[in-house]
Image (cartoon, coloured by chain):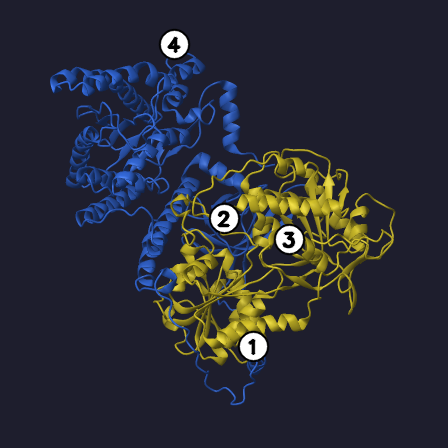
Chain colours: A yellow, B blue
Amino acid sequence: MTAPRLSGLASPRAFALELRGTPATQADVEASIEAVLREADRGVIAQLVVAPPGAGKTELTLDGVAQASGLHGERVLVASNTRAQAYALARRFVNKYGRLTVTLFVRRKRDVPADLRAHARVRVEEHIQNLPPAPCVVVATIDKLAQSALVPASFDTLFVDEMYQVPAHKYLPVAALATKQRGIGDPGQIEPVTKIDVTRWRDDPAGAHVPAPRVLQVRDPGLVVTRLSVSRRLVADSVEFVQPAFYQDLPFRALDGAAERHLEFRTLARHEPHDDVLHRLEHGASIVLAELPRAFGRVDDPGVAATLVSLAERLLARGAHLVTPEGARPITPADLGIVCAHVEQVGAVQARLPDALRPHVLVETANRFQGLERQVVLVWHPLAGQAAPRAFHLTAGRFCVALSRHRVACILVARAGLEETLEHYREETVPRLGDDEDPEYAGLHAHRTILTQLRALDRVVEVSESTGL
Amino acid sequence: MRVDPLLALRFEAWRIGQAVRAFTHRRIVLQPHALFVTALQFPGEDNTILAAAIGDRSRRAPLRILGTPDPRLREEEFETIARFAALLERYYRRCERDGVAPQLVLTSAASLRHLTNIADDLRFGERAPTVAAFATALSYFTMRAQVPDQQAVVVMTSVLRTHWVAPLEPTQEEHLGALVAAIAPPADLTVASAVLAAEQFPMGARTMPVFDRDVLRPALDQFHTARRRGASPEELAPKRLAIARVTAPVVERMYETLHKAADALDRASLAVLPEVPAWMQVEQEAFTDFRRATAAGIRTPRSDKPKGAAFRYAEREQADAVVSASVECHDTFGRTCAVMRGSSVEGQVADVRQVRVAGQRNRVTMVDVLTTQAALRVREGHELVDRSDHQVRYLVRGVRAEGPSGVTTTRLTLQMTAGMRRVGPPAAGTAVSFVREVPDLDRLGRIRRSLAQKLAEPHWTLGGPIPPPRAPGRAPALPADLPASPLRALETLR
């Protein structure tokens, strides 16, 4: 990466890393979408769209689905990972394309949110015989489709949203439902969770446990892969961290720099230790690490939990404002998110949030945060307090999700000693011929890259233990 | 703070210096006909049989000891394998006749690896059909062993470690003798000295290096010297016997320890998970399928094609799900672990009310439950099932942390979806316990049927040829003058 351009703390953008090369524009974004849609117009059998965080994957899926159904007159099936994603897709589709109808294919109608059930252009069906026979858009979860009695080739095109989260064994039966396959996903996200021993398939590049896009890449050597190269969510400063750490094969840029989106703190207050973190955010740094004194032990480290909460409180108390060319608006609790690695950490943070914040601040694990975004995100560093981390803590996908949910600022909270922890890490997985992926090395690389960069750019702020419980 | 219950038991075991009980319900039931096998490999040769002891749980059949002086002499080893194959085939036939599933009991994971090496390396050999047939027969067990908590292969160290946490290092726990000594030490020895004494003898597939050097090698040298000078079969017989005399006690000791372990398990009088009979039925079906396939000349593949992998993955995943659910529902320790992990919920009913929901004619029953669990893997939209009555079900409508800051109290707002008439809603103040999943034994069948239907036809994602690009058609009722740009064309659909 290029050397940081620091011009002294006095400058309002002192900490911001600016865009490298030509800045991305809205025209670039549209050109990418246009390229994907043109390939579909050619009738290619398989298409994979690889996108960085916040590239507008869902929008592109909606456009692709509308094109296939509304312009090409096809029967289109859209498979999502979770029910929540299916509902969100259906809702956004009918809102964007007012002339098209969508059918939600579900296990139980009563689980579907009332607004969708009441929507004039949303059909909700439980049985396959009630699915529309003509050109249509059917949205369902992968699990529902896998267990349904739908027969092979009953649709023309299958769209799989967030395809990197779908394992091959789940994808294959659903893939058989349509000849043409369209996948879109973010390769930096958390890979599918496997609970069983997958040794039997480890040397198969398209084995039962791998993410579905790898199946497409192995089965179709001529696969059309389109790489989206613009992140609309992340600002340029964040891209300079996230891209080299997690997306070496996917160069991308940001649509906005610090000038278009940054934080201002408009309430004057007596200086407190956490203000050093906020100071850097105000001066254009979008990712900062707050480092607590070294300590090892509990997964639900009370010191980290209390610091996350007090940073959130301080942010609001200092009158944080989101400033864009359109104007400034105050950051509210609903703009905040806290990403944890473990479920226990979620509980520890929630227990410490004051009543006024608790209903509004989204506190979740990285797995649950996938696909979501907030203006400001606080992150419980996965390695915080881990004396002997496991592969789980090192997973690049988990760290990547945590570092790419924010639109304007991200504060990592960790304990001192991260370098030593990484230095002494011993790999758990034994390499095997045919299995070229090394997730532990990828995790090590990502953690080291981020940490080195944070130190080099003076983004690490030592903070004392908060007086949490 | 989350406490790992197994770690807590481990501390306790070290503190008191003896094994303590963990999971309360057996997942595996040893069948009286179960085949007890202990086998040794020749040092450095992973897929050979130096000696083996074969018997059964009931001890009605006489113990068979097989041995090969040097399995590197393939013809000699093939003879041993042929005898083993005959015993195995006889056992399979007896199981078929009696309508039961075969069961193989081994000392440790190392023993299973040994037999897996034999099954994988020898079943595709062309040179010796008997050996290939034996390896194929053995592959029934080695493949079933990959399914979580199946009933076909019992790895005794694994079973004992499920029910006892011993004051041992993890590698020591893989030694059946040490584990049995820690669970049931002889009256005249302390646990530590009993473990130490037990560790002097092998319990896996390999002999001790000292044994190899001081006992086995001299006997082998004598045998080979006689062979090389062209000794007659009569002259070689005592040399063979000398080798058998040193290897047989090793496998016999392992065999006896295996029985001791089984006795310890029986003495513990552990309750059996209610799903076990159904799992035995699954084993029987798997065995019938295997025998049918073998008779048709089909051998278990070394690696899977995409379709086979999808079936196999589904089978293993479902087995894991059913076992986990069963343990969470019925096993006392399993339930504790689930609560600490957050996958089960224990709490108290705070409020019960009838509310009107838009779009529904009848009022629905909402139940508020307060829980103080530190970990909670429950989210809106999840289904919860009453642990004591699986027909009473709830849909999670809300999860909210509340109470004074610093105390983990979570309010779950649940909509009762089943059991309203038969059982009725719980009263306020009642202690409740919920699980996310209950054992669904029919699910695998449903998944298999669905997979069979969807994967019946060749599809390019399964490895078939890729069809050429298909120019899409044009949707009816589109304006004639669509713009050339697809993005602009989409504007017409807004």
- Give the mark nearest the N terminus, 3 or 1: 1
- Figure check: B473 above or below A469: below
Residue wearing tag 4? B188
Confirm whether residue A182 shows in the render: yes
Quick one: label 3, few (<14), some, or many (20+) residues within 10 Å?
some
Chain letter behind tag 2: A
Residue wearing tag 2? A437
Any mark on residue A244, and which?
3
Residue wearing tag 1? A97
Front position in the image: B452 or A199: A199
* Residues at circles 3 and 2 in contact by the CB criterion of under 8 Å: no
The answer as to whether the residues below labels 3 and 4 share one chain is: no
* Cα separation between marks 3 and 1: 37 Å
Left of B286 or right of it: where is A232? Answer: right
The answer as to whether the residues below labels 1 and 2 share one chain is: yes
Question: Which residue does the image show at 56% across and 34% down from the upper left?
Answer: B3
Quarter of the image where the C terminus of chain A is located: top right
SS at circle 2: loop
* Residues at circles 4 and 1 in contact by the CB criterion of under 8 Å: no
* Cα separation between marks 1 and 2: 40 Å
Front position in the image: B276 or B385: B276
SS at circle 3: helix
The spot of residue B253 in percent (x, y) is 29, 19
- Figure check: A13 above or below B150: below
* Cα separation between marks 3 and 4: 65 Å
Amino acid under label 3? Pro
SS at circle 1: loop
Looking at this rendering, what residue extends furthest in the bottom direction? Answer: B480
